[in-house]
Image (cartoon, helix red, strand yellow):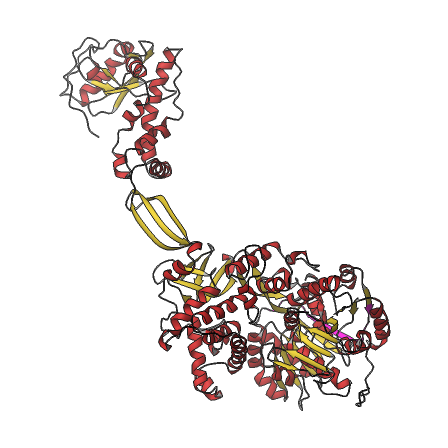
Amino acid sequence: MTNPKQPRPRNALPIDDVLGEFVTLLKQKPTLVLEAPPGAGKTTRAPLAMLDVVGKGKEIIVGEPRRIAARLAAERAAFELGERPGETVGYSVRFEELRGEKTRVRFVTFGLLLRELLRPGALASVGAVVLDEFHERSLPSDVCLARLIELQRTARPDLRIVVMSATLEGDRLAAELDNCARVRSEGRLFPLTIEHQDKPDDRPLEKQIVSAVRQCLMRESEGDILVFVPGAREIRLAMGALESLAREANVTVFPLHGDLPLKEQVSVLGPSSRRKIVICTNIAEASVTVPGVTTVIDSGLMRQAEHSPYTGVSQLKLVKVSQASAIQRAGRAGRTQPGHVIRLYTRGDFETRAEQQIPEIRRSDLSDTWLLLKAMGVRDPEQLTWLDAPDPKAVAAANQLLSQLGALQPDGLISEVGAQLLKFPVHPRLGRLILEGEARGVGEQACLLAALLTERDIRLESRARGGPQVNAHLEPGPSDALELFERYEQARQANFDASELRYLELDASSVRVVGLLEKQLVRALGSRRRDFPHVPDEQVGAVLCRCLLSGFPDRVARRRATASRELILCNGQTATLSETSVVSVAPLMLALDVEERREGQRGPQIQVRLASAVEADWLLSDYYNDLEFADSLVFEEERGRVEQVSKISYGSVVLEETRTPAAPSEQSTEVLKRYAVKHGSLMTKVLEATAILAGRMAIVARVSPNYAGNNEEWPLRVLHQACTETTRLDELEKLDFAQLALAYLTAEERELLQRLAPERLPLPGGSNVVVHYAEGQEPWIESRLQDFFGMIKSPTVGGGQVPVTVHLLAPNFRPVQVTADLSGFWERHYPSIRKELMRRYPRHAWPENGATATPPPPRPPRTR
């Protein structure tokens, strides 16, 4: 039966020239790559041309990167058939679906396409899948392609796959798809005048945009202007900066970004009575056409999410767009007539940029994707046919997180919990939060909390330049997530009235999206609701905080010190808690929203924007098997002793620690010895004591060739012995290291040492002086010159074979002569020295012949 409605007359589009070839090849081969530049018409006309290829009763699904692209493409395709969306052509996007029993072509987002692949008998009624705008290389599009190829090779050889792209290298893509068919449309692009800056402009971006827009308005009297900026914040700043200029020029300024409600996005693309300036993110780069645009102003920048498998932290980075993206952006100005492009960067800057952006699969968190693939029965997703293989480190991180969430079995297959998580269209972390909330009796409240953590911050202050501003009157609280929860409930109590939302300083658009997601999650939860404990209203907040732990078990953090905002994360990283966080007291917390920032030369810094308090008892109860109970010995410098430390740790976060004095043991000896070696003067004392002994033994070895003493390890051996007797540093310092060193010798060695290298030598007056020994030096003694009266020859050691050097001191104990020949000293030097000493010390006796004089009686030991 034919459709009674007649298709509308169609304007000729470049894609029409290759549709015949496209259909013929698609009938022959199940996989095809279609290349066509923006504006060629591939998005709407290629799927309609495929209706006769797939046959009756079979649906064609067209995957699009964004909701607005799917909806607009469906509306345009339906228009060309002379119908309304929901008849032959429909669409399915987040929070909205329009399809009917007769729908044959359905435009969906890649995210929803992935969800459809989960269903039993996935795509059983689908004859073809089209992946549009594949050059953007989003993670969902890459995963869809990999899964569809596997499905085609195993269960559905009749399934046709068409990959459509504007800039991707078709040769490479076709080769990866088993050298599939390839069709190329040259498209039609009117001439473009591209203008670069002569030199870099250091002014704020919004001021650069105002200058460029003013230039365009002065030069051209008609045609709309499309301005590309990195994100929604830059859109707001640019719109504010353009207000006065827009009034002067009688033009209207519109924002266009993914966080706008879909209806507002669509309205921007509609006709306007006045000339338009559309300030947009890269949403308008390829998949959305803004009619009437003749001028493009390109900042050359975009925000790109990158996930680090090392830290588990995602970072939204401001990056330069690739050459391919810049070309795509420029092409929006040449769709209907010659256009003009102003790039807010230099030609040299453009020429040094990467040809293509890094595919999202190489820089994203893979946990959500990996869970989907496991649920599809893909045991080892890494073995799929990837255009660019995922980073093995990111794969390992995804598997680890899913295991912590209980989503995977020990063998790597999806668990019952993992299957339940997929019922909720949020990250697995937040799905786990909902399941835990259900089990603890706060399931619906957990749905709201998950929605708040999924969507943009509902607080208006979060839109300020540089993010939320510090509130000097910020009240401490247990959780930033609960703070959002309570703010949303205030909005609910005010019936979401626009004026009340402004009074509450809440963003109406974000509140609306959170409400839509909350309802979606509650519906998913309602289908499996059972009887769970009743939780009194006053306890809901505390229960929700505990539920958050189940979704973020790898994000436990501890405050480094009381009142400090420096945190230690359980993965060993350090972080800073945002000044805007209400969690200013709790010692333990969850890092819910974390980003990595670069600040000057300091390198990457991790900031925790949203946190929630955690009790150690929750970890002891719910994650007992993940705790580490460890006893260790450490040297505590403040107390000067070895202590036994007993710790209960969760990763690098210490939950509990006790310290007690350590008992002497082999382990405590090693700890004290290590400290003594590295710190303080203790080791110096040991070295001095052992050096004296080593010098004495060198004398023995010198006169006894058969003696071979080994003293190389003495310092550490002596220190080790000293450390066995105590665990306290002050007691260690009082020990006699010289005596400990002697303890290592045998009785025979000690006797030999005392005989050949005595510690002291007697002088004629009856005093004993210390003999100083050092390896490589002659032994020496020192005393007052008068103490040597009556000593004719220099003393010796080593059985008379080693002379001892004599240091002769004046009465003030300062040296006056050093000699190893005492008899020569008396004869040659003493007479002249005697005269000087007599003059300086007249009260002392200075006989003419010191060699025969009687020495004075010994004095008490001198102290220094």
Q: Give the camera-side residue of 836 and 113.
A: 113
* Left or right of 735 in this view: 358: right
Please state the horizontal and vertical placement of residue 459, each as a whole percent of the image: 47, 77
Write the residue at 37% across / 21% down.
775
User: Up-down: is 706 above or below 97?
Assistant: above
- Give the camera-side residue of 263 and 675: 263
Q: Is residue 302 visible?
A: yes
Q: Can you say whether 819 is above or below 368 in the image? A: above
Q: Position of residue 720 (x, y in %)?
A: 34, 31
Does the rendering let one see residue 580?
no
- Left or right side of 181 for 671: left
Q: Position of residue 477 (x, y in %)?
A: 37, 71
**Between 344 and 61, the one nearer to me in the picture:** 61
Which stretch did the figure color magenta? 183-201
Q: Quadrant of the C terminus?
A: top left
Left or right: 858 as drawn, with respect to 711: left
Q: Which corner quadrant of the image does residue 437 belong to? A: bottom left
Q: Residue at left 29%, top 43%?
A: 640
The image quarter in which residue 747 lies = top left
Q: Quadrant of the N terminus?
A: bottom right
Q: Give the tally of numbered discs.
A: 0
Drawn side of residue 742 relative to residue 328, left or right: left
Residue 189 is covered by the magenta coloring: yes
Asked if the stretch drawn in magenta spans residue 732, the answer is no
Report x, y in % for residue 216: 68, 80
